[in-house]
Amino acid sequence: MRGQSWTHKLATPLVRPLLSIGATPNHVTTVRLITALAACAFFALGTREGEIWGGVWWVISAFCDRLDGQVARIGKLQSEFGHRYDYMVDNFTTSLFFVAIGFGLRHTFLGDWSIPLGVLTGGSLLLCNWYSEILERNGPPETRAYPGIWGFDLDDALYLFGPIAWLGILAPILVAASICAPIITVITGVRVLKLKREQREATA
């Protein structure tokens, strides 16, 4: 069931206090956007201090990504606009993360390659998330493009970006992501084409 990963449950105790002061899911999503932008600005600096503070702000942003959904569900404040807003912020910030670290890693062994690798990864993730949204909206109820396992959602991996930055291993992660993201995007795109073909055949 959506919203029941361990990280969602960790966010639950903050829901009632937030609701009591009139906070809405969109407020939390906006905080998620602002903190992610702050994190990416630090990552783009390409300094050790930037990696540390970028990681701090990114973990806070990832937590807000879980918190806004819980506020919506528990407070019964779900809306189509809220879903779209959350969806766009999630996709934009995750993609921006890789573009930002691409700029920040330009002085490492990756050299000038870091920027196009960051753009490639970020662009691939934007397209992949768009494909995933199509799958989830047009598939059977509760369809997940990439379901979680052992109480963790795939999106929970966002938390790892912070510790990865603190450990100073963003460069190899960017290289790996620049290879994996396009592959996963192609696979997801093929799934979308298959779904559309099956729907056409079912209505023929």
Image (spheres, rainbow, N blue to C red):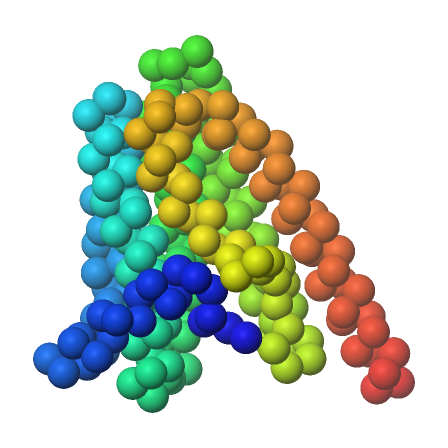
Q: Residue 73 falls in which quadrant of the image?
A: bottom left
Q: Is residue 76 above or below residue 177?
A: below
The residue furthest top is 109
Is 197 left or right of 129, judged from the image as shown? right
Q: How many marks?
A: 0
Quadrant housing the N terminus: bottom right
Residue 22 can be seen in this image: no
Q: Nearer the viewer, residue 32 or 127?
A: 32
Q: Nearer the viewer, residue 142 or 4?
A: 4
Instruction: Give me the residue at 27% from left, 29% from top.
Output: 51
Relative vertical location of residue 12 with respect to residue 19 in this rendering, above or below: above
* Residue 189 drawn at (x, y percent): 69, 55
Q: Nearer the viewer, residue 180 or 168?
A: 168
Counting from the top left corner in percent of width and height, residue 168 is at 35, 23
The quarter of the picture where residue 90 lies is bottom left
Q: Is residue 92 visible?
A: yes
Q: Is residue 109 above or below residue 83?
A: above
What residue lies at 53% left-to-right and 26% top-to-bottom?
A: 175
Residue in view at x 61 percent, y 32 percent: 179
Q: Position of residue 59 (x, y in %)?
A: 30, 47
Q: Position of residue 92 (x, y in %)?
A: 39, 53
Q: Residue at x 36, y 51 (%)?
A: 93
Q: In which quadrant will I find the C terminus?
A: bottom right
Say whether residue 168 is left or right of residue 130: left
Q: Is residue 83 left or right of residue 194?
A: left
